[in-house]
Image (cartoon, grey):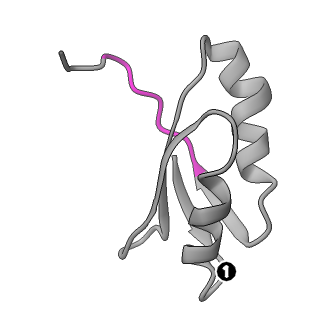
Amino acid sequence: MLIQTEVGRAEVVAKQLATLPGVLSSEYVTGPYDVVVRIGADNLADLQANVVPSVQQVTGITRTLTCPIANGVGP
């Protein structure tokens, strides 16, 4: 999930997001987005109903873009 925040809030938002259920990692970055969050759930319905809304409710977030991984590559 790519996140834009209010000016100067990226670090605070990233730290708040890291404490939420379903958030696997949260980092503030430079570029067109301010925070990159990796989220996960047991199924897509849970992700859409619980994880994404809880992320979007964090104070200081102005815009989110959810980018589901279609086919993971790894061990």
Residue 11 is covered by the magenta coloring: no
Q: Main secondary structure of the magenta part?
A: loop
Q: Which residues are magenta?
A: 65-71
Residue 21: horizontal and vertical position, in percent?
69, 36
Apparent side of residue 49 relative to residue 72 in the rendered image (left or right): right
Instruction: Note whether 59 is above or below 9 in the view shown.
Output: above
Q: Is residue 63 shown above or below 54?
A: below
- 50 relative to 70 in the view: left or right: right
Between 18 and 53, the residue placed more toward the observer is 18
* Residue at screen point 59% across, 52% down: 18
Give the x, y percent position of residue 31: 36, 74
How many marks are shown on the rendered structure? 1
Q: Which quadrant of the structure image shows residue 53?
A: top right
- Circle 1: residue type: Glu
Can you say which quadrant of the picture contains the C terminus? top left
State the residue position of label 1.
6
Can you give x and y, in whole percent of width and height, for residue 15 in the image?
Answer: 60, 64
Q: Nearer the viewer, residue 53 or 26?
A: 26
Element on which disc 1 rests = loop
- In percent of width and height, residue 61 lies at 70, 66
